[in-house]
Image (tube, grey):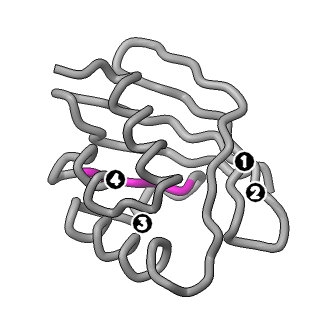
Amino acid sequence: MLTPLEVVERQFEAYNARDLDRFVSNFSETYRAYRMPSLEPYIAGKAQLTEFYATKRFNDSGLKLRAELIQRTVMGDKVCDHELLWGLTASSIEMMIIWEVRNGLIETSWAFSAA
């Protein structure tokens, strides 16, 4: 089984390649994504994740998506990425994302924006 670090590295590489199938293969069926400080998930389930990225991120809308890793820290089943996201706005967006990996798949993520 892959380590939490390996799982997060795989999803990061697939995100930058805009490879939807490879990207979503790293997430559990019960995946939940939170944009903090909200306590309600904005994505609930792998099907919703797939739909979101197929229609709003990896489509042919002209977005030049790219994530740049600034720092990565691993603690047990959690991986914390400090990233710059490019392509969603005119400038980069600074983010902190905590990924929780269980049984070789990403189960939960919490995203914090510097803005």
Callout 2: few (<14), some (14-19), or many (20+) C-alpha neighbours within 10 Å? Answer: some
Q: Residue at x 34, y 20 (%)?
A: 77
Magenta highlight range: 31-35
**Disc on res. 93:** 2
**Disc on res. 70:** none
The amino acid type of the residue labelled 4 equals Phe
Q: Earlier in the sequence, mark 3 or mark 1?
A: 3
Q: Residue at x 44, y 32 (%)?
A: 9
**Disc on res. 84:** 1
Callout 4: few (<14), some (14-19), or many (20+) C-alpha neighbours within 10 Å? Answer: many
- Which residue is denoted by mark 4 in the rendering? 23
Q: Quadrant of residue 103?
A: top left
Q: Earlier in the sequence, mark 2 or mark 4?
A: 4
| Direction top: furthest residue | 76
The amino acid type of the residue labelled 2 equals Ile
Q: Position of residue 86 (x, y in %)?
A: 71, 60
